[in-house]
Image (tube, grey):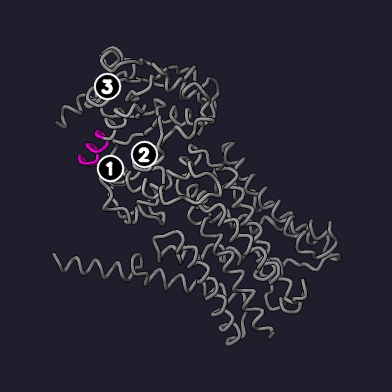
Amino acid sequence: MSHGLWIIITGSLVAASCGFVGCFLILRRMAMLGDAISHAVLPGIVIAFFLSNSTDNVFMLMGATVIGVLTAFFIQTLHTAGVQEDAAIGVVFTSLFAIGVVLVSLFASDIHLDVQHVLYGEIAYVPWDMATLAGVEMPRAVWMISGVFALSLLIVGLFYKELKLVSFDAQMAAAAGIPVVFIHYLLMALVSMNTVAAFESVGAILVVAMLVVPGAAAYLLTDRLGAMLGLSIVFGIVSACAGYIIAVYFDVSISGAMTTSAGLLFMLCFLFSPRYGVVSRVLEQRRLKKAT
Amino acid sequence: MTTAITVKDVTIAYRKKPVVQEVSFTVPEGKLVGIMGPNGAGKSTLIKGILGLLPLVSGEVSIYGKPYKSQRKLIGYVPQRESVDWDFPTNALDVVLMGRYGHAGMFRRLRAYDKEFAYACLEKVGMADYAKRQISQLSGGQQQRVFLARALAQDAHVYFMDEPFTGVDAATEKAIVLLLEELKSQGKTVLVVHHDLQTVNEYFDWLLLMNIRKVAFGPTSEVFVPDNLQEAYGGKLLFQKSAAYNAQ
């Protein structure tokens, strides 16, 4: 298969999976927690690299997931102890990310990881790193992100009711006996895993866009949670494909172009969404004015 | 008579400052109980403490003689309307269906029966025509009725309602009163955080007057007397009363 196609597939999977899970972050007004986790997982990745002395993805995934859930836990703990929530997020994720940066530079000679790569990722290298499993040869990144995407779909499917109720009304959920804390950390674990899986391809900064933008765009188009989840996947795939075409045409950063297209897609929804778009609202107001 | 709710020496604190202190009372089954007191009296906090949403510093709560945790399916809860985001992508029927989640249990899908039941609950609060309406497009009163329908869908024995009458239109107020009457006639027990002094006698059989500590608890005719009100509201009552008269 051509390199271009693998890049598109990787980008689509990353954007679809992150966008899907990110919907719940948006609905719970926790988009910035996603930002925090995406940065904070770095030391987890480096430590896993170092301990396993390999680029074994499973170790990386586990290490980062543990740190991601810890991040959410630290933030919650500081917040409960009286630190403002945004301040708690700011303190925890920058500290953890900084530890990661220190670790990267400390072990720089042992591991193939540099700060540049960590921040921006390099999706163009994805097709060079193939792995064979059960006789199928695919890029390592594709194996990983498809595994994480499948797991995300499975877990959201299993806990759909609970995730929905906790997102809408956590107090009532707790009163009805739904394990709110467990659901919260389950979501945080999913976000962490998606972050790690996306990390190699798009880097720690752009992964935030993948978590937030497709869901935010979908939110503008629908009044149903199921449709919002579905649309966020579609938007993720569309922005990955469009981004690749733009990147090839203008010879620019692929992950940058993918994220830019996601942003453009959001702008289109923001302006032209039939119900919540700026344009339709202005038209509606004019119509009402004329009617009176 | 069966005892529905026992609250014993409950103290709840927010950053070491007690907001509910040593409150005890026992509610017999089938009573409509109003919880009243000035702002900051700890009314909502008390409900959240009873429901296990806030930790108790001390004290005990039991529902039909057992701790709250083992009795969750007997309980319906109507939080304050402002406590949720009404822009959430969902419709009225879907919100009511959430009342069935606790009964369905984890990993289980809702059955057709749950949907019929939820729809019947919407009907009871006069909102059946709005079942498919996006919740952000409902008026405040309609949203409150959807919340009540969700509590009905919990098919509970004991209901806790946090300020259901606040900021609703006359039609909704009437619908809520009828609903309370119906719940009572079915032998359900209802605790309602309430603000309006004018309607207390009319709406509630029993009353809990509190201001961090319990001031009085019992049948409304015995509790709702000037001395108790003076103790609960202090000087604030004079102002509230005159404001109410001016409004009339």
The residue tagged 2 is B152
Q: Nearer the viewer, residue A286 or B66?
A: B66
Q: Which chain letter goes with mark 1? A: B
- Tag 3, which secondary structure? helix
Residue B237: mark: 3
- Give me the C-alpha separation between circle 3 and circle 1: 33 Å
* Dot 2 and dot 1 residues touching (CB under 8 Å): yes
- Give me the C-alpha separation between circle 3 and circle 2: 34 Å
User: What kind of secondary structure does the magenta stretch mostly adopt?
Assistant: helix
The residue tagged 1 is B125
Span colored in magenta: B168-178
Q: Which chain letter goes with mark 2? A: B
Q: Position of residue A263 (x, y in %)?
A: 50, 71
User: Which corner quadrant of the image does residue A277 belong to?
Assistant: bottom left
* Dot 3 and dot 2 residues touching (CB under 8 Å): no
Name the residue type under label 1: Val
Name the residue type under label 2: Leu
